[in-house]
Image: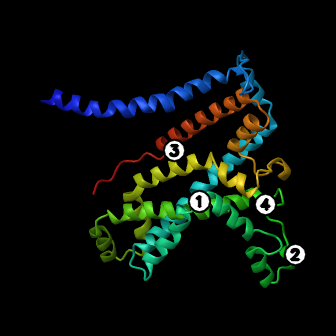
Amino acid sequence: MKQGKNTFILSFLVAPVLLYLVFVIVPYLGSMIFAFTRWKGLSANIRFNGINNFIKLWDDENFWNALSHNAIAVVLLPIVTISIALVFAFWFTQGVRGSRFFRIAFFFPQVMSVVIIAVLWSFIYNPQFGVLNGIIKLLGIKAWESFPWLGDSATIFWCILVVVVWQSIGFYMVLFIAGMMGIPTEYYEAAKLDGASLPVVFFQVTIPLLWETVRTGLVFIAIAAMDLYAMVMVITSGRIAATSRAADVLSTYIYETAFENGDFSYGIAMAVVMMFIILGLSFFTLTSTRKEVLEY
């Protein structure tokens, strides 16, 4: 009986596993092979190049510049986004008036296209008629009234990170709300009977019981921080070099190398490195945040 059940289950797994192998695993392996060649992408002339593409990465200043921006995003985005999302999720599950409206309002950016969000914030950051400089003007800060937020290499990447945080908070807030709704109310009632304040309840009850969901959110946002392609390309209008590469990330540099400069093998080598960085980052996040699971 058990053998028949296993056969029945496996019969449903054959098709998706085959599709995954054909459209995911095989292209990954193919990419790894092309990373050791010299190939322009459109030519039939493919020559073995050994590890020269990876050696070239070591001396490529643009590669390290792009990677440094991803590293900043990997450190800051999880801390800021997860923290704010946790606070909002906890707040909106405490019976706050209008919480349903705020849940929808905060989640709304998540359902919008990244392109629409990037264009919207491009107008907000506009130095002539942008909302941000308009607010600064109302506050009377004359030195910043016409500051080119997206035109200054010192601020453009930080402006992009603000947009990413703004867009991402709603998703993680809803994720944490779903987790919090599953926590038995008896724990909160017991904490209130013991005289615990809201901050104490948040850190001593909610966070420990929600930790597995928080870990999942950390992995999601860390992977997203290693991408940022669409947001950077739209906000900078694709002119990465024109901004002194101040907003360049690995994904945009890979695109430029492969599709604009026609060096596909070098671009693939960078993509392979990026893949292993993401795998290592995910493994590190899951292992370093592992705790004893609290059941309820």
Dot 3 falls on a residue whose secondary structure is helix
Sequence-earlier tag: 2 or 3: 2
Report x, y in % for residue 169.
54, 63
Amino acid carrying mark 4 in the image:
Thr
Amino acid carrying mark 1 in the image:
Ser
Please rate how many residues cluster around mark 3, counting C-alpha atoms within 10 Å: few if below 14, some from 14 to 19, many from 20: some
Please rate how many residues cluster around mark 4, counting C-alpha atoms within 10 Å: few if below 14, some from 14 to 19, many from 20: some
The coloring applied to the image is rainbow
Which residue, given by chain and number where applicable, does mark 2 sit on? 143
Sequence-earlier tag: 4 or 2: 2
Which residue, given by chain and number where applicable, does mark 4 sit on? 155
Amino acid carrying mark 3 in the image:
Thr
Which residue, given by chain and number where applicable, does mark 3 sit on? 285
Query: Picture quarter containing residue 190?
Result: bottom left
Nearer to us of marks 1 and 2 is: 1
Sequence-earlier tag: 1 or 3: 1
Quadrant assignment for the N terminus: top left
Amino acid carrying mark 2 in the image:
Ala
Kindly report the distance in space between the C-alpha atoms of the residues bearing marks 2 and 3: 42 Å
